Amino acid sequence: MGACKMNRSNLCMKDNDEAISFALEKHLCSLPIVLLHRLDIRSVSMKLLPLKPKKPRKPGKPAQCSICDKWLTTKSNLRIHMRSHTGERPYSCKICDKRFHQHAHLYNHRKLHFDKRHIPCLQCDKNFRRHVDLKNHMRTHSDERPFVCEFCEKSFRQAPHLNRHKRTHTFEKPYRCKLCPKAFNDSGGLTHHMHVHSGICPFICKYCEKTFNDQSNFQQHLRIHTGERPFKCHYCPRVFIGSGSRKVHMRLHTGERPYTCPVCKETFVYANIFKKHKLSHGDANSTVINNSDT
């Protein structure tokens, strides 16, 4: 086989990309198929090689969730979506036993174990891959709340929390249960409520085998076994397993008394003390006036 030659005059035209591409394409097309297989095609621009046209995918039939009426593009996506209602988490991490609804979420999670580009929190042992995630997390330590409600001036750490809170003013409850008349202002409330109907408790403590139908309660329970107390009081050294416990404790420092008796207008720090006070008026079912969103 004679030596393969290529017109270098075309390749000398560095200022003319089209001429170079045309010369290279013409040269490659003149080579035998056997020789093309021996070439390192990674060094050749793939756009110059003829590609087989991809067959268009057939669009899947849309399917509707029977619980929240959400429409999904395919039945496969519907099966994945249903796990958000049932609490099923079939994909587990072999390193830390954390479980996930989708394989993609497990794949992203596993990167945290092997990716050395962790951004550590300087106040606890948590690590984050993105600076924005660390920034949001740091608000749990500093109690920074930049998102303010326009109705009551209550502040929140994240925008989604503010949007959910605003529905308590507008009385919007877009998430309705199909098995009873109850409605909720966020999807998490509906998901938690559906466990009441199904009797499913998907979260099982690996230390005592106690079951939970709510993930936040489950995570707080685990801290009883691990001893983790990530929520520190801003005024004293006390630490707590949950943000709610810290919030109630901090009323001792701030003087906040969110519970008001509708009869005598006396205010209280704790809900249980307020309930006992109601008995003195002879009306245990009187409405609680709560000035704080707990």
Image (spheres, rainbow, N blue to C red):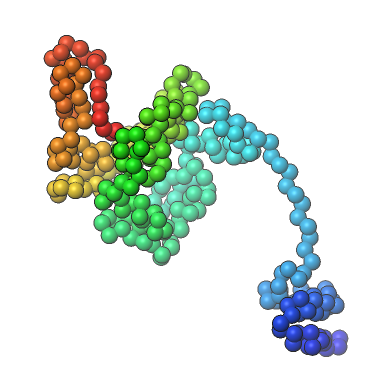
Q: Residue furthest top?
A: 282
Quadrant placement of the N terminus = bottom right
Residue beneath the point at 50% across and 36% down: 83
Left or right: 140, with 270 as reference point: right
- The quadrant of the rendering that contains the C terminus is top left
Residue 79 shows in this picture:
yes
Closer to us: 242 or 255: 255
- Position of residue 228 relative to residue 251, above or below, is below
| Depth order, front residue of 234/24 | 234
Q: From what the image shows, is residue 61 above or below residue 259?
A: below
Number of numbered discs overlaid on the protein picture: 0
Q: Going by the image, does 99 lie left or right of 82?
A: left
The answer to whether one can see residue 199 in this image is no
Give the image location of residue 147, x and y in percent: 35, 44
The image quadrant that residue 256 belongs to is top left
Q: In which quarter of the image is residue 284?
A: top left
| Residue drawn at point x = 21 percent, y = 43 percent | 240
In-front residue for pair 5/107: 5
**Rendering quarter of residue 63:** top right
Picture coordinates of residue 189, whole percent (x, y):
41, 31
Q: Say which residue appears at 69% left-offset and 39% top-offset.
A: 60
From this view, report whether residue 90 is shown above or below residue 95.
above
Q: Residue visible at 21% across and 19% down?
A: 262
* Residue 170 screen position, x and y as percent: 41, 28
- Image x and y of residue 126, in percent: 32, 55
Look at the picture and state if 173 lies above or below 143. Answer: above
